[in-house]
Image (spheres, rainbow, N blue to C red):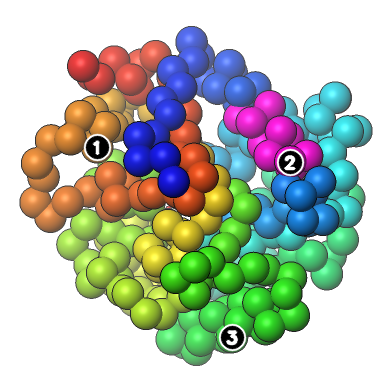
Amino acid sequence: SNEKPIVRILDSEEDAAVALAEYTANLSEKYIKQKGSFSVVLSGANLINTMRKLLKPRYNTTIDWSKWLIFWVDERVVPLDDPLSNYKLAFDGFLSKVPIPKSNIFPINYNKSPADVAVDYESRLKKLVDEKIIPLSASKFPKFDLILLGVGFDGHVASLFPNRPQRYEKKRWVTFITDSPKPPPPRITLTFPVINSASDIALVVLDKGKADIVAAALGGAVVTPSLPCAEVKAEEELTWFLDKDTASKLK
Ligand SMILES: O=C(O)[C@H](O)[C@@H](O)[C@H](O)[C@H](O)COP(=O)(O)O
């Protein structure tokens, strides 16, 4: 793997959205050619809006949507029709507008217990690995093609927060949190061993309020505890997508 991330600094949020579409479409073509499918793992929040260019020509007409598999890097433990659901956000803003087969979309099975939801999601991933739909990494974690991550103001990725133990999980594929500092409190999340087994990862940060966090993560500043976003590694390539304002504090 490439130890050094690629840092792309675009002029504006609009340009970053275009660059993200181009990047995603290229990976889609590459992995579908290579392995017959393209597994994409989504975050919530702003990311879905940044993916909007994929819904427009030429991407919407040239991408082989039937080969996409959709997962969530983290999910709020709420019913799937709740306005806080990452699934609902992705469905309303993206998935309902492209012809991805419903059977290729893997939202959580909602249940009141975050622990149960995590166990269920992990066992469904295990089944997909057994069925050879998702490959296994050398370290025996599921290997997704592309994980798309946002970064929080505290440097979190997925629902792996700086001051919470979930970020140190080494064995589980999916874990849960009942006291997330970002609301809502109950969530499930993929763990670092799974995230860092992905082939390609995009960290998409387009918010000048996060300029300091990005500079700390990319500038190698010593922060205790370390920033989760600085712990992300990809098997093939890790790419940061920033706009000028968000990158303004980079040296
Ligand atoms: O549950 C969520 O909200 C996310 O999946 C979370 O990990 C998000 O990606 C970051 O908090 C950044 O969110 P923004 O990009 O909206 O700031």
Q: Is residue 232 left or right of residue 213?
A: right
Q: Position of residue 104 (x, y in %)?
A: 79, 65
Residue count near mark 3 (Cα–Cα under 10 Å), binned few <14, some 14–19, many ≥20 = some
Image x and y of residue 161, in percent: 28, 59
Label 2: how many Cα within 10 Å (few below 14, some 14–19, many 20+): some
Q: Amino acid at mark 1?
A: Ala
- Determine whether 150 is above or below 101 in the image: above
Q: Which circle marks residue 217 in the picture?
A: 1
Of residues 49 and 100, the one drawn nearer to the viewer in this rendering: 100
Where residue 204 appears, as percent x and y from the top left, is 47, 36
Give yes or no for residue 35 being in the magenta stretch.
Answer: no
Instruction: Identify the amino acid type marked 3.
Output: Ser
Specify the quadrant that holds the C terminus: top left
- Residue range corresponding to the magenta coloring: 20-30
Visible in this render: residue 190?
A: no
Q: Which disc, if any, is residue 30?
A: 2
Q: Are marks 3 and 1 in contact (CB under 8 Å)?
A: no
Majority secondary structure of magenta residues: helix
Identify the residue at horizontal 18%, vertical 62% (top origin): 163
| Mark before the other along the chain sequence, 2 or 3 | 2
Q: Is 56 displayed left or right of 121 in the figure?
A: right
Q: Is residue 226 left or right of residue 83?
A: left
Label 2: state its secondary structure. Answer: helix
Q: Earlier in the sequence, mark 3 or mark 1?
A: 3
Q: Are marks 2 and 3 in contact (CB under 8 Å)?
A: no
Instruction: Identify the disc placed on residue 123.
Output: 3
Which SS class for mark 1?
helix
Q: Are marks 2 and 1 in contact (CB under 8 Å)?
A: no
Distance from Cα at disc 2 to Cα at disc 1: 29 Å
